[in-house]
Amino acid sequence: GAVVSQHPSWVICKSGTSVKIECRSLDFQATTMFWYRQFPKQSLMLMATSNEGSKATYEQGVEKDKFLINHASLTLSTLTVTSAHPEDSSFYICSAKRTDEQYFGPGTRLTVT
Amino acid sequence: GENVEQHPSTLSVQEGDSAVIKCTYSDSASNYFPWYKQELGKRPQLIIDIRSNVGEKKDQRIAVTLNKTAKHFSLHITETQPEDSAVYFCAASNIGSYIPTFGRGTSLIVHP
């Protein structure tokens, strides 16, 4: 149990376009999901906490108008990178909380050209 | 907020040796300390965790110790194998509020 999926696994987009990434908890309900960004050989940087039915809580320095998060159901949270630029290229990972534990999705490699 | 320091950043051992990774945290309210293993290009996987009501937990070759007074916790891997090679992250959080803070990671290399 405790499987989290993420889609797409990789995406290439042009500068100025928007990209949506989906995070799903497949076999449990998650009222809380997290979105992380990870640069090569670096740690996980928490971007925001997504709570079902309410607005996401963004970490300091993360632009909420650029990284739109929607947690419309207990099994789905989405991250939309709006007006993407090359500096947004990164590995984005979601995780879902089940009781005390956190389960990660496989990540999405975003490349903005 | 919470601050988690992790050392070393890189650890190289011979197969069969033990490996120890150490983390310190700053917030005395933190009471949940998970460890994750991340292989290259893959998701972090929870390998072991410890709560503040115990001082040690063991699962086969992996053990974690916690010293609440000193605010540090450690991951111990015995009889290391090449497949243990990965990046290991520690984290600290408060179960009630649960906003996890991660360490910077330790790249473990096990030489056959």
Image (cartoon, coloured by chain):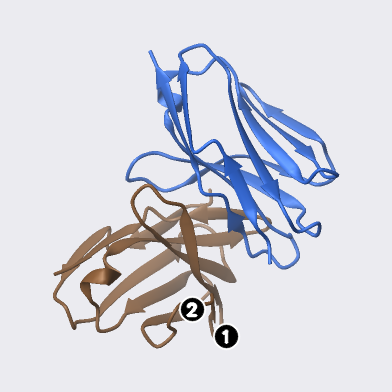
Q: Position of residue B46 (x, y in %)?
A: 55, 43
Residue B71, image x, y percentages: 77, 46
Residue indicated by mark 2: A71
Residue B110 lies, in percent from the top left, at 43, 21
Q: Which chain is displayed in brown in the rendered image?
A: A
Element assignment for label 1: loop
Of marks 2 and 1, which one's residue comes earlier in the chain?
1
Do callouts 2 and 1 point to residues on the same chain?
yes
Q: Nearer the viewer, residue A54 or A83?
A: A83
SS under mark 2 = strand
Q: Residue at x 30, y 75 (%)?
A: A20
Q: Residue at x 46, y 47 (%)?
A: B44
Residue type at mark 1 is Ser
Which circle marks residue A54 in the picture?
Answer: 1
Task: Answer with left or right where residue B104 lies relative to residue B97.
Answer: left
Count of numbered circles in the view: 2
Q: Is residue B73 left or right of residue A16?
A: right
Above or below, A95 relative to B69: below
**Which color has been applied to chain B in this rendered view?**
blue
Neighbor class of circle 1 (other Cα within 10 Å; few <14, some 14-19, many 20+) is: few
Amino acid type, residue under disc 2 in the picture: His
Q: Is residue B112 above or below residue A66?
A: above
> Tags 2 and 1 in contact by the CB under 8 Å rule?
yes
